[in-house]
Image: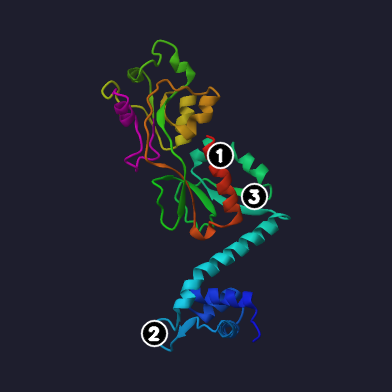
Amino acid sequence: MRAPNNLNALRAFEAVARHLSYTAAAAELNVTPAAVGQLIRSLETYLDVELFHRSASGPSRLTLTDAARAALPDLQGGFDLLSNGVERIKASKSRIAFTLTVPPAFADKWLLWRVERFQRRHPYYDLRIDTSRHLTDFTAERIDVGIRYGAGVWPNLVATFLLRDEFFPVCSPALLRGRHALKTPADLRHHALIHDISMSDFGVFPTWRSWLLHAGCRDAVDTDRGLQLNDSALAIQTAVSGNGVALGRTTLVERDLAEGRLVKPFEAVQGCELAYYLVHRKESGQSAPVLAFKEWLLEEAGTR
């Protein structure tokens, strides 16, 4: 018995299995429904296995047989690997662009000054960075991979833990000198408090009130006063300028601390259950650029 064109036949089977329709599968494959039907019949004959139950009535005229349903995930995984291999071949001679969505403050304070290392390692990938503040729809907005801050669960996305922050006051070195130099948490009453309210919808997100309670200084400072900003990077920059004391987050202040623009006047730090996660759609998990970016990003996070 002559074998059918197995790759075309298997591709036709996978498309029909998703759509449960010869017509929809044909439109996707840019062939006629009759051609799809012929490929399915030739594959069934060659395998000597029925792949679909066919009926003339009911909400769907096609349903998968048990054998077809069991084989479909492996087949779809195989097509993903084939696509990944093709992308790698194409990348050797041409550039491949992929899109990353990331919170603007994280991009500004943590990612952008590191991303050159990714570009040196993978010169054929062009990274497009979207810093929209809203939660993007990965499918509608054609997003390949993202970094999100939260509890680690988002509908229809696979999340991989990246980084968790500690929270502590930060300020300009100038505030450690002078008449009201910051020596103890109680000295904060002499300085403007900078409030980052960008995550105020999350009750577990640390605030000045919660940090002072953690530091054992609950009643010495009025935490209702000060400057409220809904941009984390702007809150940090305001502290750099010397116009108050901000409640810093590890990932957002590490470079300013290392380069002396900010100092940490007190030792007490507060943890938080929220964290940064790398996220992507399940079907994008084996994409060559997503795999490459994920590997690099986890390495960067591990050496923070």
Q: Tell me the distance, in whole angstroms, between the alpha carbons under discs 3 and 2.
A: 48 Å
Which residue is painted at 46% across and 54% down in the image? Answer: 158
Q: Which residues are magenta?
A: 195-217
Q: Is residue 141 magenta?
A: no
Which residue is painted at 53% across and 43% down in the image? Answer: 298
Residue type at mark 1 is Glu
Q: Tell me the distance, in whole angstroms, between the alpha carbons under discs 1 and 3.
A: 19 Å
Query: Does 151 sit left or right of 3 as displayed?
Result: left
**Does residue 117 appear in this view?**
yes
Q: Measuring from the top left, give residue 14's x and y in whole percent.
A: 54, 73
Q: Nearer the viewer, residue 67 or 177?
A: 67
Residue type at mark 2 is Gly
Residue type at mark 3 is Asp
Q: Residues within 10 Å of mark 3 (few under 14, many from 20)?
A: some
Q: Is residue 210 magenta?
A: yes
> Which one is earlier in the sequence, the residue at label 1 or at label 3?
3
Would you name the residue on which mark 1 appears? 300
Q: Could you say which disc has been placed on residue 203 in the image?
A: none
Would you name the residue on which mark 2 appears? 58
Mark 3, secondary structure of its residue: strand
Q: Nearer the viewer, mark 1 or mark 2?
A: 1
The answer to which image quadrant residue 12 occupies is: bottom right
Look at the magenta stretch and give its main secondary structure: loop
Q: Could you say which disc has been placed on residue 126 in the image?
A: 3
Q: Measuring from the top left, give residue 181's x and y in whole percent.
A: 41, 14
Which residue is painted at 53% across and 52% down in the image? Answer: 145
Q: Is residue 291 above or below residue 68?
A: above
Asked whether disc 1 touches disc 2, contact meaning CB atoms under 8 Å apart, the reply is no
Work out which quarter of the rendered image holds the N terminus and state it: bottom right
Q: Nearer the viewer, mark 1 or mark 3?
A: 1
**Does residue 223 appear in this view?**
no
Q: Tell me the distance, in whole angstroms, between the alpha carbons under discs 1 and 2.
A: 54 Å
